[in-house]
Structures are given as C-alpha cells and as structure tokens.
Image (cartoon, rainbow, N blue to C red):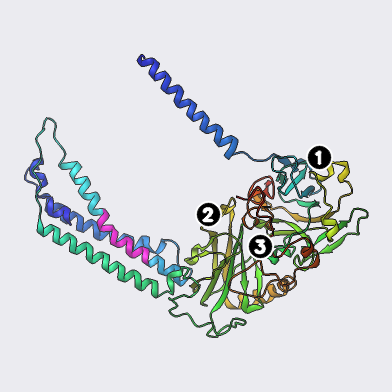
Amino acid sequence: MAAEASSPAAPAAGSSGGRRDGLWLLVSWIVLSIIGCLLVALVWGPHLPPGAASNTARSQQVDFTVLGTIATPVVIGVLLYFGWAIAFWRQKPGDETDAEPIHGNARVSAIWITATSAIVLALAVYGTIELIAPAGAGAGQGPQPVFNHNIPAAASDTSWSPGTNNVLQVQVIGQQWAWTYRYPQFGGFETTNLVLPVGVPVRFNVTSLDVIHSFWAYQLGVKADANPDVNNVAYTTPEHTGGFTVRCAELCGIWHGAMYDYGKIVSVSDFMSWTHSTAIQLAAVTKLLPPYALTYDPTVVASMGKVNTQLGLTGAGGGFYNPADPEQP
Amino acid sequence: MSLPARVTTLVIAFLAVVAGGIYVALHYIGAQPPVENYTSYASNGQVNVTLMTTAQTTVTNKPDWVTYFIQNPSTKQFVHTTYFEVPANTKVNVTILGYDGCTPLRNPVWGKVAGVTGNVENVQFFNGKTMSASQPISTFDSWADCSVQHTFAIPGLGVNVPIASVTTFNENSNLCGTSPCTGDPSDANSPHTVVKFSFTTPKTGGVFRWQCFVPCGLGYVDGNGGPMGTPGYMMGQMEVQA
C-alpha cells in the first residue's frame, strides 16, 4: 500500500518521462494479486502439506492456504515495487544528484497502520477459531486438554466398539529410539504398529519412557511432545484410509533421525479385526506389561524377582546404576 | 612483507584450517567401527553370523562399558564392532554368546521375540559347568525372572530378540572379567548363554540400524548414554548388500 502511495514522488528524481508510475503500479499490483491469489487458493492450496488425511491435517491445509493467499498480494507488491524501481528509477550514468527528500505522510501512515492492524487482528481471531474448532488443531494440549470440540467423552477406558459415542484412546510411548502404541480399550496390548480406524475420533495420550521425544504423525497433522512422567493429549479424526509417517521431532539422541515408523488408517471393520488378532498374538507379553496408566514409571516394578533383588536392582528405570560412577555426566 | 608473500601466507593458512576441519570431520565425527563382511560367506541362501555380549570392554579405554562383539567370518576372532554386512534375500542365522548378567527391560514389551523365524529364539544356558539343552523361548518376563541381559533389535525389519541371560545370582556374580570373553582361557568356563535365531534380509539392499533396548549405559542418566549411544558398543548397523 505504501508503495503505491509513495511511488509518485520517487520517479520525479528519476526522470520517468511523464509515466504515471503510481497508477501503473497499482493496476499491475491488483491484476497480479488477483491472479496470484486464485492460483494459491485454487491450484496450490489443495496440494499443500500435510494433506487431508484427517480433520486436523485438513484444517492445517486450509490454514496454510488462507495464510498463503493473504501473503500473496504482499509478496507481489514488494517484488513488483522492487522490480519497478530497478527498471525505471535507477540512477542514470553521470547523474550524481540526490533524490528529493521524503517527508512524512500522515495519510499513508494511517492507512498502513490501520490495514496491518486489521490483518493481524483478523488473523489472531481466525487462528483462535482454528485452534478451537478441530479440537486443538492436532497439537499436544498437556494432561488436561482444553480444546475438545466435537470429541466425545471417554465413556470407557477399557472398552470400545464401533458406533458408540466413545473416543478411541491410543497411548503413544516414546523411547530411545522407537515408538510403541498401547490400546487400553482392547486389553491394553502394546505394539510397534499404529493402526487407526477411519472416521473415528482418536485421543492420543503421548508420553515417554526416557528422554523428551516428539510424536509427529505428519499426514495426520498431529504433533505432541513426549515427556517422561507427563501425559500429553492430542486429538484427531482420520478421514481417509491410507498410510502416514510417524517421526520424532525432538532431538533425542544419536538415532533420533532413524526414529520413525509408518501407521495405517483402515476401515473400522479392518481395525476391529486387527485389534482382535493383535491382542491374541501379543497376549503373552501383554500380561507382563505394567497396569495401564497415563504415564509410565519404570521404577515401579510389582514383580521384581529374587535374583534381581539380590543383584541390588529396584526398578527398570536405570536408577540402579551407581550415581558415583566416574562415567556419570 | 611483499604482496606475493602475504597472499601465499594467507592461502597456506586457509588450506591449513580447511585440512584441520576435514581431519576432525573424518577422524572424529565420521569415524565408525570396522565392518565385518559376511556377504561372501553365504551359501545356499543362508549365512551364519555370530555375536557376543560382554559386561565390559577391556579392549578399549571404556572398560566399564557393556558391548557387543562380532566374530570375523574368516579368522573366527571376535572383533570389537557392531557393523556387519550380509547379502540381500538371505536367511541370516544368528548366534549370540551372552556373557553379561541380567538387567530388567525398561519396557517389558521388548521381552517378546518378534520378526524372526517362528518368533522364537533357541537358548542354551551354561552355568560354568554344564550346558543345558536348547529350548525355544518366545517371551521373557525380565522383571519376575533374571532372564534378559540385552536385546538385539532391528526396528526397520521388526526384529526384536531379547538376549537371554544367566539365571542365578551366583552366575551373575561370576561373569567373565575380560573381553571378548572367549579371548581369555580363564573365561572359558564363565557362565553364559547361547542364543540362536534366524531372520531373512530384504530383497533389496539398504542400511538398517540395530540396537539394544535395555538401558545398559552404566552410570549415565537412565542408563541411556555411553555405550547405548555410541556406535560399536550397544548399537550398530547391518548393511544389506543387494
């Protein structure tokens, strides 16, 4: 905006030869901005990451599209003014005179402040709504989530069946350097495979066994830090069947870059079949797992055996190592 | 100082700094343990790989770190490394000589054998005098029993094998004191386990990291530093040659 308003003064020193730079710039900017906005919103937008595999991902894609569309006229304005200045207002050979001094312009300043304030405040309102509507926008909300719009209550922590108004719970456990997933509503089995049913609201309870990790289900638009002794809740609702990638987004050690796996969104019937077969397959190890809890305390061991006790071990958390060891950092 | 001399000095100084940077990058950052290449030792679609765990690493300047060794397929000597190569689309028959004592799994889910033939490992226990008969085991309860020392896991292939440990307090207190354990005649009778399992490598090549899921970094926070985070000790790479 300021570019158009101030541009008529600039060419006076640049001998524009009577060209009406301000008008040309304004018209060019409007035409290019309309074209650019249409391209961003209609052509590029539907292909922006993270895609539309879930309601949170789709919401983020819309947000990126809106922000990209709003930014397009600004980018075009800056580049257009930049190019115009280089093309027409550059210093001619032999011309060593100074340009005309620029004085303040209250009208331009008022327009600029008003317009930018309106844009920022509008985006703040839009951003807040977008955070509330898709239940936290896929971000970790801590142990007591505030944004749970359209998420059904956890009617049961120990059972789940299709068609019931009960959020599916999946515990995500980070450890150096792998993710495991626990399904408390299906007997509490724990597996290295993350499988979700399509069209069902999911509550991720994200925690860690050791250091800080970050659960980033990229195509789902879900990202939540995995902190030891903390339950970090994130919501999403898968909307399309297919695969997605899970990565760790927090530098967590030497194999951080290799801490990824692949999840699947399947039909509800396939999901039920998978949970049934997996629960049977993992039954032997499931009964060895600690009782389901929203955080994992490896120092609480109910069945510490005689030999381990004789060896001086009190838990599985590594706390049994001698703190006076010279290697202790 | 003349201009040519200044330029020459500047160039030499610049090259010295660059050379120093390259040396640091290659020698320290890019350094990796030696690679035991089993590729040419495969026959009939199978290859045999032997590893060892020890409670210490007396062959390095980190004697109190637990570690893996890999047997050289030619000399049969155990080499302090965790890097090995195997051919693609080949059944890998792994033998692990477990000379370390027991440590509970932080996450009991790693007590289940997975991703290997039959989802079982065959274990023999040597108590210092006699070797037990081989028995197939599919799941370990490392908390109730003194049964696991480390794991051999290749997450990219879904392989997870808990390495069985000696089972009594007396055996745990009489582990071999040097490494590799079979390198010292006095260790010949040390209590240990012999763990055998098989898995098949992918049809295409690739590099797969493997690691231990027992937090066995003695003296480090939660047991996750030191040997757990250092190539050549409790983590390494398996390169599959297509």
The residue at which mark 3 appears reads as A317
> In the visual, does A201 lie left or right of A122?
right
| Image vertical order of residue A160 relative to residue B102, above or below | below
Distance of label 2 from label 1 (alpha carbons):
37 Å
Mark seen at residue B77? 1
- Kind of residue at disc 1: Gln
In the structure shown, which secondary structural element does the residue marked by tag 3 occupy?
loop
Q: Is residue B48 magenta?
A: no
- Kind of residue at disc 2: Leu
Q: Camera-side residue: B88 or A275?
A: A275
* Quarter residue A301 falls in: bottom right
Distance of label 3 from label 1 (alpha carbons):
35 Å
Distance of label 3 from label 2 (alpha carbons):
21 Å
Who's the residue at 41% across and 69% down the image? A59
Q: Is residue A64 magenta?
A: yes
Image coords of residue B234 (percent x, y): 69, 50
Image coords of residue A261 (percent x, y): 59, 60
Give me the chain letter of mark 1: B
The residue at which mark 2 appears reads as A251
* Mark 3 or mark 1, whichever is nearer to me: 3
Q: Residue furthest left?
A: A18
Mark seen at residue A220? none
Q: Tell me which segment is drawn in magenta.
A: A63-75
Q: Camera-side residue: A310 or B206?
A: A310
